[in-house]
Amino acid sequence: MVTVTNSGQRRTPKVAKTSSVAKKAVMAVSGIILVLYLIAHMVGNLKLFAGAETFNGYSEWIRRIGEPAVPGQTVLWIIRVVLLVAVVAHAWAAVSLWRQAKRARPTQYVARKAVAQSYASRTMRWGGVILALFIVYHLLDLTFGVANPAGHDATPYDRAIAGFSNPFVTAVYVVALLALGFHLRHGVWSATQTLGQSNKTRERTVNAFATVFAVVLTAGFLIPPLSVLVGIIE
Amino acid sequence: MNLKLRVWRQRSAAEKGKMVTYEVTDVSPDMSFLEMLDVLNEQLILDGEDPVSFDHDCREGICGSCGVMINGRAHGNGLFDSHPQTTTCQLHMRSFKDGDTIDVEPWRATAFPVIKDLAVDRSALDRIIQSGGYISAPTGTAPEAHSILVAKKDSDAAFDAATCIGCGACVAACPNASSMLFTSSKVVHLGLMPQGQPERNDRVVNMIHQQDLEGFGGCTNIGECSVSCPKGISMENISRLNHDLLGALRAGARPKS
């Protein structure tokens, strides 16, 4: 290594108080919490196939988890708060690291050729933005019902059927879920690496698992809306 | 061979730079990339122009001085399937074809300000080393080599990490301009050795702190670094660094500022 020059000419870059690796760890842990929720969410969605009564009953059960030990909706609200904190922490870490990366290379290369980066890793940031916007729409559609064709007073099953019968609504879900799939593909690998659990021998397994996991979860989420659209669920 | 070069020209850190096109004629396929730049510079000097500045020293791929972006790749690594990952000085012109246009740019990162043309100031990497890339050991007669045993697996992994020559290609290739591959190779090569244990926690915390202070980006585990590294240093070192850092933070180690 050579490089000795006048260090006085260097401008001191703005630096955050939290280390970049600690931020990555926040991102990884909050991501894991969200992924665990997504697994439960995906399994729950498949109950659409069991008919209106089962699905609505399941939806009602979520509100009653923990009863009578705790008052109704207690567990539901705990889950909601944990998810909200996880989403905010995930986004905070992402935005902060995104800005750090922008500051780290203000001048772009005239010619640049990537050979290692995957589509999934390249689209993590904008894919994340798409997912954040989708979550807002998704809550307005199926949780609050205000953006749903069947409206706020319909049962959860009717809301799902009314929404997914519309090709435009289903198209939005398909795009967002594909974005989720790519996000998970790189996210699972990246979180393993960030939490220091990867090594040369595990690397291949972790990457293979990330691909399979992303495909299974995305497929699990895509099946109910598409089944409604083509009329398998009515 | 006759080549068209588009080279980044920048008179100083304070001035703006731009790509300038040059024709280089009668290039031998046996020349190294740097020798080809020497030919260009001789021609520029004869024409009364300012020669292109670039860093170089050993010209045998071991010192880490040279390094430019060649057609968008650090050291040109990843452009030629037939060519092993190496440094710019060991890239030979036979990898190119007659009539090729080659883009040559400096490493681009806030932490690597351009000194002139293709030469950048990489002392940020030196300061990361200073912040923790050392061990404290008594000086004097060399100790008996077998008095401290090291597992073969660990010594091999430490040696692989220690092959880092600090050229900065990982930073140049990283979409985030992160120096994680460099820092991790330093953290790991000492952290796997018994001699590196006393400072292990402080080392990782201080080196990461210094890396952030220098204005490098964060790692997003994309992997451009490893395929651009002339020594092929593995991404597993980054995972080991992360493991060390999280352990050190749990143990209460904090960067000294």
Image: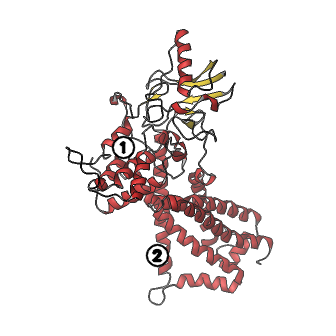
Judged left or right of residue B198, residue A37 is: right
At x 76%, y 77%, the residue is A233
Between residue B161 and residue B114, name the one nearer to us.
Answer: B161
What residue type is disc 2 on? Ile
Chain on which label 1 sits: B
Q: Position of residue B243 (x, y in %)?
A: 40, 59
Q: Quadrant of residue A113?
A: top right
Chain on which label 2 sits: A
Quadrant containing the C terminus of chain A in the rendered view: bottom right
**Mark 1 = which residue?**
B213
The 10 Å Cα crowd at callout 1, few under 14, some 14 to 19, many 20 or more, is some
What residue type is disc 1 on? Leu
At x 29%, y 55%, the residue is B146
Quadrant containing the N terminus of chain A in the rendered view: top left
Judged left or right of residue A4, residue A68 is: right
**Mark 2 = which residue?**
A78
Q: Secondary structure at mark 2?
A: helix
